[in-house]
Amino acid sequence: MQRTSHSRVWTTILPSVVCAFLIGCGGPGEDSTDDDGGNGGTAGAGGSAGGGTAGKSSGGAGAAGMIGGTGGGSSGSSGGGGASGKGGSAGVSGASGAGGVSASGGMGGSSGGKGGVSGASGAGGAGGSSGGFGGAGGKGGGAAGSAQAGNGAAGTSSQAGSGGQPMTCDSVGSSMTVNATIRVGPGQTYDGECRRFIAAPNLGDGSQAEGQSPVFEIGDGGTLINVVLGAPAADGIHTEGDATLRNITWEDIGEDAMTVSGQGTVTLDGGSAVNGADKVFQVNAASTFRISNFTARQAGKFIRQNGGTTFTTNLFIDNCDISQMSESIARTDSSTSTVSMTNTRYSRIGDTNFIGFNGRITESNNTAY
């Protein structure tokens, strides 16, 4: 049997004893499994704690892993003897957890909402058989997006369609007898839908007798469109202030086709009038009377300011066809009234086109035929 040398035993045991009683030895550092890096080794009984090894895990995605703290104690002195006396190595600073993969920033919100779709340009109204009203401008498209919104540009309105003569009633609808004047209130619009309106005997017989009643009376700001006045038409139409008339046809002028009864601006666009014994239009109040795209045939005068009156009337005649007026196109007794006639065809007019205006006349691009 082999003997163990006393010197070898002491060599093995003595360091442990010395370490335990004199200086203390650190235990082995403890590996960390945290995401936060290794914890320092537990302090030996007397020696400073050995440092833990670096943490293994990387930090979670998103925030960077925390840096593992270095082991708290300084390295224990290595025991010269038994395995337990081996001083723990100073803990190595845990490697910083790998920065979490940067969470992709939430996708930027889509650029601001799209701007309103540009409004389609309104198509210009097609001219009717003899021209047709220009179409109204198309509505503008959606408003342009704000600085945050998309860049949709506002739609541009189209220009109104160019036209020759305004629309006419190609065919006349049903006929109706009018027993009491039809009143179009202020700001209202009456659409006759191309029906024929005939005055009942109690309104008048359409002769030159005074005191007849109108078939229509238009209040201030009212509008009358698409009307055919048959025979008899009594005293036609009266206006009481600003008024707009479009596409009005008189199959028989009657006493007067229309009388401007109240002060204002009256606009008549489109239509025709035939067969009058005296004047087509009578002006009884200071006003501006604009008439365009109109055909008048066979009467004494196209427009007459009430005889003997001195108020100012301004007449504008444009793109009309006037023929067979036995006296004149327009007549006034006022020293301040004016007349302008442009782009108009005329024929077989009395001795002169205008009476009483004394140089207050503007003419351009008119044609005699």
Image (spheres, rainbow, N blue to C red):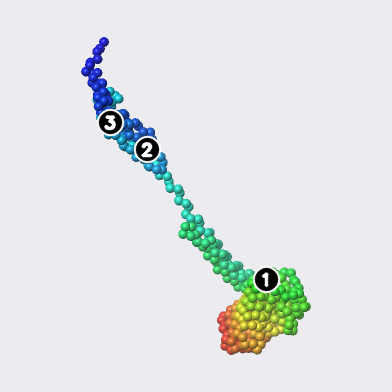
Amino acid type at mark 3: Gly
Q: Earlier in the sequence, mark 3 or mark 2?
A: 2
Instruction: Report the residue marked by disc 2.
Output: 36
Instruction: Report the residue marked by disc 1.
Output: 190
Q: Are marks 1 and 3 in contact (CB under 8 Å)?
A: no
Residue 116 position (above or below residue 61): below
The crowding category of the residue bearing disc 3, from other C-alpha atoms within 10 Å (few below 14, some 14 to 19, many at least 20), is: many
Q: Residue 168 at x, y = what percent?
A: 66, 71
Q: Residue 178 at x, y = what percent?
A: 75, 74
Q: Say whether residue 70 is visible.
A: yes
Q: Secondary structure at mark 1?
A: strand
Front: mark 2 or 1:
2
Q: Nearer the viewer, residue 252 or 268?
A: 268
Instruction: Report the residue marked by disc 3.
Output: 47
> Most extreme residue toward the right, as rendered?
201
Q: Nearer the viewer, residue 189 or 49?
A: 49
For the point 75% across and 78% down, the residue is 203
Q: Nearer the viewer, residue 55 or 317?
A: 55
Measured Cα–Cα span from mark 2 to mark 1 = 86 Å
| Residue 157 image-quadrant placement | bottom right
